[in-house]
Image: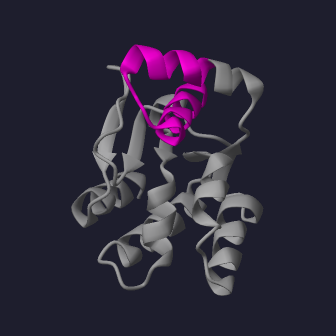
Amino acid sequence: MTEPSSRRIYLDANVFIYGAEARTELAEPIQNLFRAFNARRGIAVTSELTLAEVLPKAADFQRCYYLNLIVWSGIIDLYPVSRDILIETASYRRAAGMPKLADAVHVVTAIRANCARVLSADGHIKLPEEMSLLDATPQNVARLINELS
């Protein structure tokens, strides 16, 4: 069963990267967040574009981690990068003044997936007024985990 769309959370690619890197202060909180998403399926969303962002520099063990978490586990609702998303992304980039293609693809995918919030370590993402950007800090991740419990 999926959660109401207003509770869905879009995950930017950098969230997955921080979760896979044991050296960062975000690794453990984000791994705990993924466990919370596992218990409450249908809440976490990302784009297939995330795979193209996280896999190039990944070591073999990280590659397996990413593929298992994002593709095979069923924890994350994975949205395709379709022609419609790319066309809408071009319009959104122009309207919002977003120069980065990847960021705009993530925003449009979040909109299409009816996400109310975007979790990201990139504070430069421009979202529509009805959506909120959650900075990926240990405190915000802990709040999300409490909310999901």
Q: Locate the C terminus by quadrant.
A: bottom left
Q: Position of residue 90 (x, y in %)?
A: 57, 21
Q: Nearer the viewer, residue 45 or 18?
A: 18
Q: Is residue 140 above or below residue 132?
A: below
Q: Quick one: which residue is furthest to the front in this view?
A: 99
Q: Locate the N terminus by quadrant.
A: top right
Q: Position of residue 59 (x, y in %)?
A: 62, 83
The part of the image, by quadrant, that contains residue 141 is bottom left
Model colouring: one colour
Q: Position of residue 115 (x, y in %)?
A: 50, 33
Residue 89, magenta (yes or no)? yes
Residue range of the region highlighted in magenta in the rendering: 88-113
The part of the image, by quadrant, that contains residue 98 is top left
The residue located at (31%, 45%) in the rendering is 134
Q: Is residue 110 left or right of residue 139?
A: right
Residue 100, magenta (yes or no)? yes
Q: Is residue 42 above or below residue 94?
A: below
The residue located at (28%, 45%) in the rendering is 123
Magenta-drawn stretch, dominant element (helix, strand or loop): helix
Q: Nearer the viewer, residue 95 or 29?
A: 95
Q: Is residue 97 left or right of residue 62?
A: left
Q: Position of residue 136 (x, y in %)?
A: 32, 57
Q: Is residue 68 above or below residue 13?
A: below
Q: Nearer the viewer, residue 117 or 14?
A: 14
